[in-house]
Amino acid sequence: MSKEKRKPLKQKKVKRVVKQKAYFTEESDEQIVKELTERIKNARNYMFSRLSGVNSYLALQDVRAIRNEWRKNKELVKQFKLPARFWIITLEDVVSNLKSLWSITCNKIKQAAKENDHLTEDEKRYIRYVCSVPLLFGSILTRKRFVRPKAIEKLTIREKYVHNLICRYTRRYRGKTPYSYSKTFQLDADMYEYVQENGVVYLRMSTHIKNNRITLKCSDQNMYKKNIRVTMDDHIFTLAHAVDSKQKQIWTKENTVGVDKGYKTMLVSSSGNAYGENLNTLLSKETERLNGINKKRNQYYAMVRNLEEKGDFAKAEVIRNNNLGKKKYNKNKRKHEETSKSMINHELNRFIANEKPSTVAIEHLTFVSWHHKMPKHIKRKLSRWLKGYIDERLTFKCHLHGIQYEYVNPAYTSQECHVCGCLGERTTQEKFICATCGTYNADENAAKVVKKRLGDKEITLYTPYKKVKEILQNREQRVTSPI
């Protein structure tokens, strides 16, 4: 990836999701919607099972061809028990999800190939190229021959070995067949309409019953025209609308800022400012609360299992209904999640307003390894760390404000000194000690190292962590060895 200075993003509009709440106006409509969501869920899961295999990969590139083929197969679509509009928009959603999953798989394959020392540079380049071209990648997965394009025609590779390696990597990274449990579905612009009566906005939407539209009461006065995603949870509908927002540029000069993401403090910038210092307290408190509740509930689950094994299903059902309900549990859990997300967005807005960055350097923290031995309470807390949501909102706000962002290699950022580049010691969560330069705040030092990595030509985003350590040790020897 090129590290040279680039011009700021010139994006006039940014896509974002606006959520709207809605409620039933008639109790009789609830059963209709439950039946509709169940049919759509079953159709979606059938589509996932039908199209997620390697033999369907090439077909995913043309959703219209799949749609037209299924339309001709009356027996196939009859089992969905849905009007054509519903199963077609569900099919488009499933194909979009599967293509995203395949894209993630290809990125993992490219990264694994880059870190594979047994491959030559030509072979790594070959894998990067074929994983970026669906026709070639699909041909390899289905063991079909193809003519190499000019870009990779002259590369010297062990073709059989490389193709088998790609297939092995695919099996490793593709994951399980997706399965949906959620009560969610999509509506296109012709499947619903907004009406306003006596100052109240209502949404009238189509169902699986012919010439039948149910009416929902909206919580606000907003009305939209594009496709919407509808989610029903505890009699409450969440309507997710994709809208365009105008980009707002608040930075006035070139200003590169590095950020260190952490559990204790959400973000620390390279200028030394901390954002979201109380987030860990909020998350830890909820983690321990849920742990206590789940321990008590596990006793009831064990009682239910024992009663069912003995054949006393009536008593087991009484315990399940009276002691293992989910309404209050889910309500409190959602309330905490919304509070946490509100705090994250507030702190990110404060970060943008205070720092006014033109470029943000971000650690590429894609996973937390569970293979290392850690205490259970640490694993519980890390499992509730909203780093994915923080990353998503940070990049969105960068788009919204015309800010360039770039991911950097996170290896040893917390152990490298930002001044001399030597490996130091992080004695506590707050303190970093470099034998050459002295003591610094650990998070601020890491943020400055992240910023420094933007211009580092030796340590790129895909440099293996072992190679990163080797580079840092070599630099340390040059600094500490006498001339």
Image (spheres, helix red, strand yellow):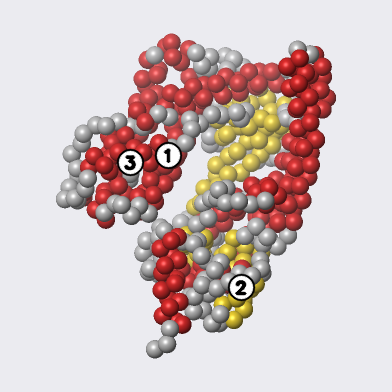
The Cα–Cα distance between marks 2 and 3, rounded to whole angstroms, is: 42 Å
- Indicate the amino acid at tag 2: Phe
**Rendered residue at 51%/65% (across/down):** 412
Q: Secondary structure beneath disc 1?
A: helix
Residue 400: % across, % down: 54, 56
Residue displayed at 42% across by 27% down: 51
* Residue 370: mark in rendering: none
Quick check: can you spot residue 252? Answer: no
Give SS at disc 3.
Answer: helix
Q: Is residue 49 left or right of residue 166?
A: right
Across and down, in percent, residue 401 comes to 54, 60
- The residue that disc 1 covers is 172
Q: Amino acid at mark 3?
A: Ile
Disc 3 crowd rating (10 Å Cα; few below 14, some 14-19, many 20+) is many
On the image, numbered disc 2 is attached to which residue?
432
| Mark identifier at residue 166 | 3
**Which quadrant of the figure has residue 233?**
top right
Amino acid under label 1?
Arg
Is residue 108 in view?
Answer: yes
Q: Are marks 2 and 3 in contact (CB under 8 Å)?
A: no
Give the Cα distance between marks 1 and 2: 38 Å
Q: Earlier in the sequence, mark 3 or mark 1?
A: 3
The quarter of the picture where the N terminus appears is: bottom left
Would you call the spot at circle 1 few (<14 residues within 10 Å), some (14-19), or many (20 or more)?
few
Rounded to the nearest whole Å, what is the CA distance between mark 3 and mark 1? 10 Å
Quadrant that contains the C terminus: bottom left
Q: Residue at x 34, y 37 (%)?
A: 167
